[in-house]
């Protein structure tokens, strides 16, 4: 990565259009283990064939490339999955996912959970604001302000999780540019830049 590389959180909850569909619940067969997808643990061995989720009544029926979801998993269209799969190095699970519409009918089979496995020690602890349980540095409650450390970023892939909060998905400027260069540009791709300390 170059010194100028910038990084962004993917907002996988937001919908840019009220007509975009929204997913509230995980795949029923893995409900109790769905935290693994959120935290970057492997779930491939227990992931069911024909896995499906249902569109929420809170959303519409229009399929965006990045699906808003209450479970905070990364759900993307087949074309976005193929770009990321060919672009990003590292350990990932690409888990096929069907989406059922409001009438309990199959809407599409062309979606995937993307599960980046593991997480990376990449925060600047001095500049980040981290909440610890009773001051114990090994028991993190949450992170109020993320500041990445440029010195720790040398071997990190273009899509990754932060050790202190693996439920967040981070992409590099390089991957963001590749996504935005797709024709048409992916729908519902919402990002927020993360501060990086030199």
Image (cartoon, helix red, strand yellow):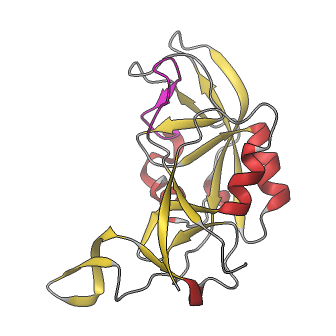
Q: Quadrant of the N terminus?
A: bottom right
Q: Residue at x 68, y 85 (%)?
A: 154
* Observer-nearest of 57 and 86: 86
Residue visible at 60% across and 67% down?
A: 6
Report whether 5 appears left or right of 26.
Answer: right
Residue closest to the eye, 89 or 127 = 127
In depth, the one of 150 and 56 nearer the eye is 150
Start-end of magenta stretch: 14-27
Q: Nearer the viewer, residue 115 or 65?
A: 65
Q: Position of residue 183 (x, y in %)?
A: 82, 34
Q: Quadrant of residue 189?
A: top right
Which residue lies at the image location 42% right of the left edge and 34% below the top edge? 24
Spot the residue most to the right. Answer: 86
Examine the rendered structure and indicate whether residue 102 appears above or below residue 99: above
Q: In the orientation shown, which residue stands out farthest toward the left?
A: 134
Identify whether 45 is placed above or below 156. Answer: above
Main secondary structure found in the magenta portion? loop
Residue 84 belongs to magenta span: no
User: Is 86 located above or below residue 139 in the figure?
Assistant: above
Residue 124 picture quarter: bottom left
| Rendering coords of residue 145 (x, y %) | 33, 70
- Count how many numbered circles sit on residues in the image: 0
């Amino acid at each position: 990565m170059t010194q100028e590389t910038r990084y962004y959180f993917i907002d996988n909850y937001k919908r840019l259009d009220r007509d975009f569909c929204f997913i509230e619940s995980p795949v029923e067969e893995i409900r109790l283990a769905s935290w693994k997808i959120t935290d970057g643990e492997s779930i491939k061995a227990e992931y069911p064939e024909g896995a499906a989720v249902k569109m929420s009544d809170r959303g519409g029926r229009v399929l965006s490339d990045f699906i808003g979801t209450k479970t905070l998993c990364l759900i993307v269209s087949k074309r976005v999955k193929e770009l990321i799969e060919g672009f990003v190095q590292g350990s990932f699970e690409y888990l096929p996912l069907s989406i059922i519409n409001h009438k309990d009918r199959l809407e599409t089979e062309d979606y995937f959970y993307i599960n980046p496995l593991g997480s990376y020690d990449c925060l600047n602890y001095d500049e980040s604001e981290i909440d610890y349980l009773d001051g114990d540095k090994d028991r993190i409650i949450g992170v109020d302000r993320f500041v990445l450390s440029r010195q720790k970023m040398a071997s990190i892939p273009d899509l990754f999780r932060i050790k202190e909060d693996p439920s967040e998905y981070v992409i590099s400027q390089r991957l963001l540019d590749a996504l935005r260069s797709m024709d048409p540009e992916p729908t519902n791709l919402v990002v927020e830049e993360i501060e990086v300390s030199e």
